[in-house]
Image (tube, rainbow, N blue to C red):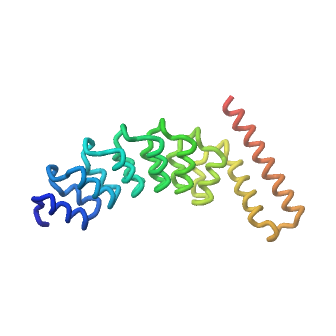
């Protein structure tokens, strides 16, 4: 590889290269403008930008392009909005959201983007509806990530949505009513159990 000695050489390299390209450019040539261009091309290039050269806008561009670049966002630019944008782009970026910033909204957005993100959701935020959302995208492989005390409710939601999805396709009207009644009963039992667990 040609040795980079000028800013224009560095610019050409950034335009042609990948996220790691910025790491090959000498520090004295990594201006804020060059770093901004590299981050716009690939959000993960934020890893190779000095914290003193990072800006709020640059960090937002990075997470919009690749949510996993949230790992390299300095604490001073780590806001709820930055985290939300990151997890909407890539649900697994929830791993890099600070624990104190993991809200119901951010966790729901992450799970909606990628059901596997459920593994990074704090246990206390794993509601039946959130777990059901994760299972809709990933399937029953997530059963180990679902708190035991709400597994029945999640299964009931899945059964209920299956019954609704197949209305008129194989269920007789009385069977639909019975399935819905059983599912609602299970949801109520689980809601009561989760209230008892909190007390």
The residue lying at 86 percent from left, 57 percent from top is 178
Which quadrant of the view contains residue 175? Answer: bottom right
Would residue 41 appear left or right of 104 to someone viewing this image?
Answer: left
- Counting from the top left corner in percent of width and height, residue 40 is at 33, 58
Placement of the N terminus among the 4 image quadrants:
bottom left
Residue toward you, 189 or 125? 125
Residue toward you, 182 or 68? 68
Would residue 156 appear left or right of 174 to someone viewing this image?
Answer: left
Seen from this angle, which residue lies furthest top?
199
The residue lying at 47 percent from left, 56 percent from top is 89
Would residue 92 appear left or right of 37 to someone viewing this image?
Answer: right
Tally of numbered tags: 0
Eyeballing the image, is 110 above or below 173? Answer: above
- Counting from the top left corner in percent of width and height, residue 84 is at 49, 47
- Counting from the top left corner in percent of width and height, residue 173 is at 88, 64
The residue lying at 56 percent from left, 40 percent from top is 123
Placement of the C terminus among the 4 image quadrants:
top right
Would residue 56 appear left or right of 20 to someone viewing this image?
Answer: right
Which quadrant of the view contains residue 54? Answer: top left
Seen from this angle, which residue lies furthest right?
174
- Counting from the top left corner in percent of width and height, residue 181 is at 84, 52
Eyeballing the image, is 182 above or below 4? Answer: above
């Amino acid at each position: 590889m040609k040795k980079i000695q000028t800013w224009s050489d560095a610019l050409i390299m950034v335009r042609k290269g990948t996220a790691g390209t910025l790491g090959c450019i000498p520090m004295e040539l990594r201006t804020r403008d060059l770093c901004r261009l590299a981050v716009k091309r690939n959000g993960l290039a934020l890893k190779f930008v000095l914290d003193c050269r990072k800006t709020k806008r640059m960090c937002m561009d990075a997470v919009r392009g690749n949510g996993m670049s949230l790992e390299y966002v300095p604490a001073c630019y780590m806001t709820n909005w930055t985290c939300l944008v990151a997890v909407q782009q890539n649900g697994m970026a929830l791993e890099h959201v600070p624990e104190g910033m993991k809200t119901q909204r951010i966790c729901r957005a992450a799970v909606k983007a990628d059901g596997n993100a459920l593994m990074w959701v704090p246990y206390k935020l794993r509601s039946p509806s959130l777990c059901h959302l994760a299972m809709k995208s990933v399937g029953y492989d997530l059963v180990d990530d679902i708190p035991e005390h709400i597994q029945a409710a999640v299964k009931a939601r899945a059964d209920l949505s299956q019954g609704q999805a197949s209305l008129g396709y194989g269920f007789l009207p009385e069977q639909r009513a019975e399935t819905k009644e059983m599912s609602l009963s299970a949801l109520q039992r689980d809601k009561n159990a989760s209230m008892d667990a909190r007390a």
